[in-house]
Image (tube, rainbow, N blue to C red):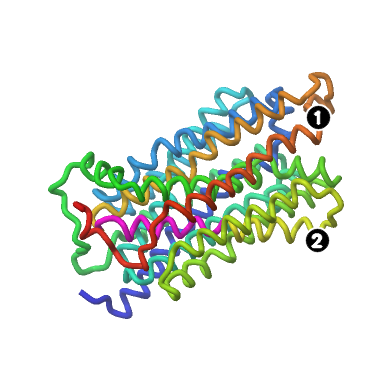
Amino acid sequence: MKMTKKEFSLGIFIFFLATLFLIYEMAIQVSPSVMTKELMKDFSIDAAALGWMASVYYYSYTAMQIPAGLLFDRFGPRTLLTTAALFCAFGILFFSLTKSIYPAAVGRFLMGIGSSFAFIGVLVVASRWFDKKLFPTFVGITQFTASFGAIVGETPLAKAVQLYGWRDLMWGLMIAGFVLVLLYIIFLRDHPRHEFADGSSHEHSILSHLKRVMQKGQSWFCAIYAFTGWGPIIMFAALWGVPYLATRFGLSAFHASFGTMMMWLGCGLSSPFVGFLSSKIKRRKPILVIGSLVGLLCFSSLLFFSNLSFIGICVLLFFSGVGTSAHIITFALVRDNNHPEIVGTSIGFNNMAVVIGGAILQPIGGFILNRYWDGVSLVHGVPIYPLHGYQMSLSLIPLLYLIGFLVSLFFIKETYCKNTFSEEKK
């Protein structure tokens, strides 16, 4: 049944409500990056411990991606997003009250559980409320929203930490979470007024849904690209970028956070265009290949060239983010390659690959940094890491871009923007 203009307008409003949680989730996801020194000082920990504590968020987030996708295939966004916002608010409350790293990690774990529903929820809303031809564009808008949330979590939060302290900042984020809960209870709806019908069926078990997704080789190749595409953001912009830029180029905390913000900005601004362009040219692969190549060249330049101006740094980080935005096409690919009834599961599987980088790359980065620390260099109890330690740690990022380039060039198949689920048994 075709949507009326009134239902389309309502769909836009519902989509907007869902994106508010995504903005919120991204802000709390990257918030440790602007309070690294404060957290290390208050908890008396080093970079390895901080990397582990921050990454606990991604352990629960990653583990919940497939269950979240399965739950969205069974239940509506209203119930799940409301519950998810509650988890985030209580996790932030727990995190803000503790004075020890282990309870803080529990708070990050709860935040990760709630946040795991955000990105999938927005895409499920888009798939339920709008024509499938618009899906890649809405994926792009969703990624723009996520990047905007991360931008909110960078420079503005860095300023708030300076003015009010990190604990008061977290209290403000907690209150915002409860406001979202009220908005969702009052306004959020699962689908248009007429009975929702996308070909979904509950005849299959949730395990059969997951099996159908995982049996496809293209699901795995898309997941590998998604991991390598988002990994640079997770490792650099979400945690280690600010201290690296300060150490490498002598930038202040504010200017360093502004530089990392440019990476989010490049990803966010280009994402809607990438989704629109893919639908316009009816191709997926060229965008993936070019995106990885652009990211590889720009970030390698940032890592290995020392005589860079602040403007040059910002330009390279902006286009590194542009290259990263190509990973959103993998969500269109998994929709192309799977039946509409398992869209939530397929999106959850792919998004699990996106966020698992936080659980793997952030602690690895901290471990490598610690290997190069002399064990004695401290300022106000905070370890001071050498430049070559940061360079060795962040050299993983060009490798990620390179792997994405090779996977997209040789292993991912072009779908020409057509759904291929009718060929599942071939």
| Kind of residue sitting beneath label 2 | Ile
> Does 30 sit left or right of 36 as displayed?
left
| Mark 2 burial class by Cα count in 10 Å: few <14, some 14-19, many 20+ | few
The boundaries of the magenta stretch are 324-339
Location of residue 325 by image quarter: bottom right
Residue 336 among those drawn in magenta = yes
- Residue 220, x across and y down, in percent: 38, 45
Q: Is residue 176 above or below residue 45?
A: below
Apparent side of residue 58 relative to residue 78 in the rendered image (left or right): right
Left/right placement of residue 4 relative to residue 223 reads: left
Which three-letter amino acid code belongs to the residue tagged 1? Ile
Q: Which mark is residue 199?
A: none
Task: Measuring from the top left, give residue 128's x and y in whole percent.
Answer: 30, 63
Q: Main secondary structure of the magenta part?
A: helix
Q: What residue do we see at 38% from left, 57% from top?
A: 413
Identity of the residue drawn at 33% across and 54% down: 78
Residue 317 is at least partly visible in this image: yes
Q: Does the magenta portion include 334?
A: yes
In the image, which disc is placed on residue 311?
A: 2
Residue 205 falls in image quadrant: top left
According to the image, label 1 marks what residue?
384
Mark 2 vs mark 1: in front: 2
